Amino acid sequence: SLTGCGQSGPALGKVTGTISLDGKPVSGAVIRFIPQGEKGSPSYGGTDDSGNYKLMFTSSKDGAMLGDHFVEISTTRISKSELAELKASGQQVPQGEFVAIPKKYNKRGSLTATVNKGKNQIDFDLTSK
């Protein structure tokens, strides 16, 4: 018999949480969980105006692979034309003001997290210093 991922894919844990900087929620942040093992696909999420995120493994599957991950968090300024395109396409657009996340949080190895089976609440309270 064959074992492995099969058509359903790897086992995933649901991951939600909040991202804050110096105690204030960060809207418009992009978060990425990258499996620390040799194989595996990263999961992505974005924060809403309250700093809440939910990780997506694919466009139709939420969650992240089980195990240890490197975590990268960043924000980018969106130009007015990009903002107009996002709004026109019906995507959620962050309303809060732009907050620059220190570059150290977008380097592999500075943040880590473990995803377990079931629901995971993983919050990141970042500091600007």
Image: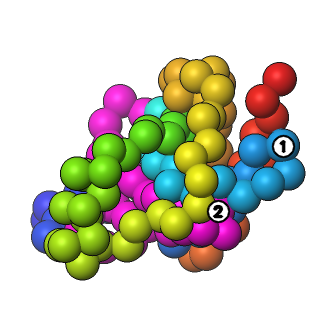
User: Closest to the observer: 28 or 12?
Assistant: 28
Q: CA distance from mark 1 to mark 2?
A: 12 Å
Q: Is residue 25 left or right of residue 112?
A: right
Q: Nearer the viewer, residue 1 or 6?
A: 6
- With respect to residue 31, does 108 lie above or below? above
The answer to whether residue 123 shows anywhere in this view is: no
Residue ID at (24%, 78%): 90
Q: Residues within 10 Å of mark 1 (few under 14, many from 20)?
A: few
Secondary element at tag 2: loop
Q: Quadrant of the C terminus?
A: top right
Please give the range of residues in magenta. 37-63
Q: Secondary structure at mark 1?
A: loop
How many numbered marks appear?
A: 2
Would residue 7 be counted in the magenta stretch? Answer: no
The residue under label 1 is: 22
Q: Main secondary structure of the magenta part?
A: loop
Left or right: where 66 falls relative to 52: left
Tell me residue 15's x, y (percent).
55, 66
- Horizontal side, residue 2 vs residue 82: left or right: left
- The answer to whether residue 91 is above or below residue 80 is below
Residue 39 magenta-highlighted: yes
Mark toward the start of the polypeptide (1 vs 2): 1
Residue at the location (44% across, 58% down)? 45
Give x and y (percent) for residue 119. Answer: 61, 75
Give the residue type that dot 1 points to.
Asp
Q: Is residue 60 left or right of residue 102?
A: left
**Residue under label 2:** 51
